[in-house]
Amino acid sequence: MSTDNELLKLEDLGPEQLAEFIHQLIDKDFSRLVQLLYRLDVSEAKLRSVLLEHPTGDAGEMIAQLILERIAQREKNKQLFKQQGDIPEDEKW
């Protein structure tokens, strides 16, 4: 599965399904998880902080929550810039 298709698929998953997917990546393909987090632009500092604050917590669930927050943030930004993107025709490049 290509990374772009993977990102689209993640948006369709619920929190529990996403956590299970993250668990699979942790167990079987950690480098793919790292690549996915990088591609989604999940804050490394925030990830590290969350994992350190909850050392006995479920890493898959915590990472899934960060991914869902980032997807929501990206969607919010997309809508914001779409609204601000109404540039008059004579000012467009």
Image (cartoon, grey):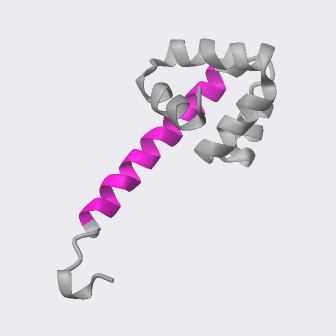
Quadrant of the image occupied by residue 65: top right
Q: Quadrant of residue 32?
A: top right
Q: Is residue 58 left or right of residue 71?
A: right
Identified at 28% across, 69% down, the residue is 85
Q: In front: 15, or 89?
A: 89
Residue 90 or 42: which is nearer the viewer?
A: 90
Residue 17 in the image: state x and y as whole percent. 52, 13
| Residue plotted at (79% across, 14% down) | 27
Q: Relative to 6, is 77 on the left or the right?
A: left
Q: Which residue does the image show at 43% across and 40% down from the upper left? A: 72
Establish if 38 lies above or below 36: below
Q: Is residue 58 visible?
A: no
Q: Nearer the viewer, residue 77 or 7?
A: 7
Give coordinates of residue 38: x percent, y percent.
68, 44
In magenta, the rendered stretch is: 61-83
Residue 62 falls inside the magenta stretch: yes
- Does the magenta segment cover residue 22? no
- Residue drawn at 66 percent across, 36 percent down: 36
Quadrant location of the N terminus in the rendered image:
top right
Instruction: Find residue 75 and report its horizontal and vertical position in percent.
Output: 39, 46
Q: Quadrant of the C terminus?
A: bottom left
